[in-house]
């Protein structure tokens, strides 16, 4: 194989590839040897079909297959030998080819630009550590305790009040007739929450354990027996028990009910949970800070085909007029994104960062845990969608790159309180809103080309109609 690189300047390159017919014939021989043992033709034993017969029967198909393989092998090798990383799919233009002939073709390729990554080590970024005050942890545990239902049996002569938990059996009738679904055993209601039928539980206030009470309520729109919808029903209720709400005691037993070993372990878990809530958001700020620094790096040329692809993604779902208005802005965003992507990818390659199958499976399990009750659906989604797996692999790859950048770059470690974390996040949110509004305002203020053309035309007309001023020439 002989390769000649043409138009070496710029990112668009043409590689002229020449493969002599001797090499092409060796590929053909390999293919014929490969298929001769598998072909069954009448009158010939397996593996004994003459080459000429095979050529007559399958020659065109075999050459087409061999040509595809040679083009794939030689084009890949040509790019690798010349250290060209293609930005997109290269185009192949066949100049001469055929059986028992030399192969000559042109590879037209847009090359990824060379990027400099040494400056990454000079990037400065803030690395936040949130120190959680024990009082914050205790406050969160108290909030959890308030949500945990806890009731104690009331004395037999205690009358029910709002907030009590009442257990009862009931039989319901409409027009003195029983109906399907009109019976209930050991039904429990927290009085005052109005969760059974509208106005039902309030009628159970002021009675005692063992009492019988007839309650009237209207059957709802979604009642299964359609002919009874919106009809008044009478519920004869037998009160089985009354329980008063009691404060939950925060102790080791309470902690165990929540899955912790003891109260100290629960405090540790809750403290970490609060820390993680802020750390994840602050880590995103740190990442954005690093990415903005990388945006400042210089890359001489950005491949036009990559810009075009990114602009298409950014303008998805927009009408043609809006696409045209936003084109310039989208191009700027696209260039920044591509530049950052190129630099991160080069950093990953130079540092030999890879995503292992185990790391990918760990991330899939993480995604599954985020959707409790829908584990099978999430697993099926990833098993059936290779594009989703590729996207997840890209996420893990970028995360590993960012972690290594943090190790190599210059971190400014800041230990902050929960309140300070909230303040920093609020400022960041406000800044983002301000920047987005600024971009929106710029877009709205831009005059359309028609308006600009009209203004230009008016200026010309005004210029034509206004009298020309002439200088007086003095006679000497």
Image: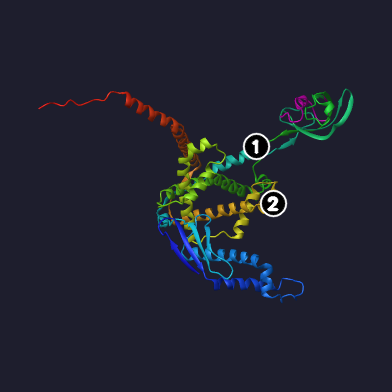
In-front residue for pair 21/3:
21
Q: Which residue is mark 2?
A: 380
Left or right: 100 with respect to 194? left
Residue at left 83%, top 25%?
Answer: 233
Quadrant housing residue 162? top right
On whether residue 197 falls in the magenta region, the answer is yes
Residue at the left extreme? 476
Q: Which residue is mark 1?
A: 146
Instruction: Provide residue 232's location: percent of width, then percent of height.
Output: 82, 23
Q: Secondary structure at mark 2?
A: helix
Whether residue 211 is visible, yes or no, is: no
On whether residue 152 falls in the magenta region, the answer is no
Whether residue 104 is visible, yes or no, is: yes
- Which quarter of the image is occupied by the C terminus? top left
Real-space Cα distance between discs 1 and 2? 38 Å
Q: Earlier in the sequence, mark 1 or mark 2?
A: 1
In-front residue for pair 24/90:
24
Q: Secondary structure at mark 1?
A: helix
- Magenta stretch bounds: 193-214
In-front residue for pair 204/366:
366
Q: Main secondary structure of the magenta part?
A: loop
Residue at left 66%, top 70%?
Answer: 55
Left or right: 408 with respect to 147? left
């Amino acid at each position: 194989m002989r390769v000649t690189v043409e138009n070496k300047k710029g990112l668009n390159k043409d590689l002229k590839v020449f493969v002599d017919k001797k090499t092409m014939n060796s590929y053909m021989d390999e293919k014929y040897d490969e298929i001769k043992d598998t072909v069954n033709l009448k009158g010939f034993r397996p593996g004994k079909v003459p080459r000429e017969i095979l050529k007559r029967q399958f020659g065109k198909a075999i050459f087409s297959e061999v040509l595809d393989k040679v083009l794939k092998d030689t084009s890949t090798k040509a790019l690798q030998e010349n250290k060209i990383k293609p930005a997109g799919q290269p185009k192949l233009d066949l100049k001469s080819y055929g059986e028992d002939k030399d192969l000559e073709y042109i590879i037209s390729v847009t090359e990824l630009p060379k990027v400099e990554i040494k400056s990454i080590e000079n990037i400065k970024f803030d690395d936040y550590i949130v120190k959680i005050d024990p009082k914050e942890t205790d406050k969160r545990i108290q909030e959890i305790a308030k949500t945990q239902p806890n009731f104690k049996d009331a004395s037999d002569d205690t009358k029910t009040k709002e907030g009590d938990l009442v257990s009862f059996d009931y039989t319901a009738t409409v027009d003195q007739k029983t109906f399907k679904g009109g019976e209930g055993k050991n039904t429990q209601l927290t009085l005052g929450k109005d969760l059974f039928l509208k106005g039902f539980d309030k009628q159970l206030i002021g009675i005692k354990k063992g009492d019988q009470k007839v309650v009237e309520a209207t059957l709802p729109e979604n009642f299964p027996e359609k002919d009874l919808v919106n009809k008044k029903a009478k519920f004869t209720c037998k009160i089985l028990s009354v329980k008063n709400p009691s404060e939950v005691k925060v102790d080791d037993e309470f902690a165990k009910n929540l899955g912790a070993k003891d109260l100290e372990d629960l405090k540790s878990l809750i403290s970490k949970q609060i820390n993680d809530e802020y750390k994840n958001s602050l880590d995103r700020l740190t990442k954005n800070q690093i990415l903005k620094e990388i945006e400042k790096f210089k890359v001489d040329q950005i491949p036009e085909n990559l810009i075009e692809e990114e602009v298409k993604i950014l303008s998805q779902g927009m009408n043609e007029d809006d696409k045209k208005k936003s084109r310039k802005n989208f191009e700027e965003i696209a260039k920044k994104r591509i530049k950052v992507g190129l630099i991160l990818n080069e950093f990953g390659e130079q540092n030999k960062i890879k995503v292992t199958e185990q790391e990918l499976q760990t991330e899939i399990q993480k995604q599954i845990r985020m959707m409790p009750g829908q584990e099978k659906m999430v697993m099926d989604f990833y098993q059936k969608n290779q594009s989703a797996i590729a996207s997840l692999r890209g996420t893990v790859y970028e995360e590993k790159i960012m972690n290594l950048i943090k190790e190599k770059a210059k971190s400014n470690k800041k230990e902050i309180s929960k309140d300070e974390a909230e303040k920093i996040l609020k400022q960041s949110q406000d800044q983002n809103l301000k920047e987005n509004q600024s971009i929106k305002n710029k877009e709205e203020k831009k005059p359309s080309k028609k308006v600009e053309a009209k203004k230009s035309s008016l200026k010309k007309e005004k210029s034509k109609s206004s009298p020309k001023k002439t200088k007086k020439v003095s006679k000497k």
